Image: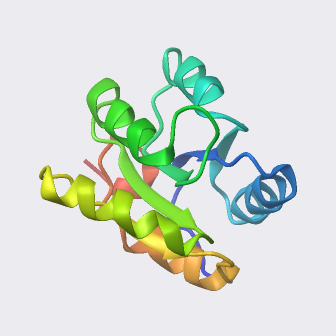
Amino acid sequence: MVANVGERSILIVEDEKVIADTLAQILTANGYDVRLAYSAEDATSIVSEWSPELAIVDVMLPKMNGIELALYLRKETSGCHILLFSGQPSVEGLIQKARSEGHDFEILAKPVHPTVMLNAISALPCTKSSACCGPE
């Protein structure tokens, strides 16, 4: 596994509970401060009281899709990175539409090996004054 430098706050938004819970266990075991949302609605409620440094969002969520949620999170949270993931090839149209509107998101294909996910997270620049950013 990849070692985490300091604690980073991560919101996982995934409607498949087994995937969400497993990812949360992996990230928590690697020192991350993790909160879970099983729907976009749960995620919007969580970020009204807590601002994560990173949101890992499934693209195919019921009601509000992951891209709509990602746009909401960018607007409502300060400096939150968005990492999308999906096992559905049909999301490419949603991604292209977002890009054509000037929104660019990193997307990982499911299933994601834990090392790939941890490497993607550790490669993101730190945006908050947490231990992961190093001394100020």
Q: Is residue 123 left or right of 63 when viewed as pictured?
A: left
In the rendered image, residue 81, in percent from the top left (x then y), is placed at 36, 51
Using the image, determine if residue 107 lies above or below residue 130. Answer: below
In the rendered image, residue 109, in percent from the top left (x then y), is placed at 55, 77
Task: State the residue in front, 30 or 81.
Answer: 81
Q: How is the image coloured?
A: rainbow
State the residue at coordinates (28%, 40%): 79
Using the image, determine if residue 41 lies above or below residue 121. Answer: above
Task: State the residue in front, 124 or 95.
Answer: 95
Q: Is residue 52 left or right of 123 when viewed as pictured?
A: right
Kindly tell me whether residue 132 is visible in this rendering.
yes
Using the image, determine if residue 133 lies above or below residue 65. Answer: below
Q: Is residue 25 left or right of 79 when viewed as pictured?
A: right
Kindly tell me whether residue 104 is visible in this rendering.
no
In the rendered image, residue 121, in percent from the top left (x then y), is placed at 48, 67
State the residue at coordinates (66%, 45%): 34
Instruction: Report the number of discs.
Output: 0
Using the image, determine if residue 81 lies above or below residue 125. Answer: above
State the residue at coordinates (73%, 45%): 15
Quadrant housing the N terminus: bottom right
Q: Is residue 103 left or right of 37 when viewed as pictured?
A: left
Residue extending farthest to the right is: 18
In the rendered image, residue 129, in percent from the top left (x then y), is placed at 33, 41
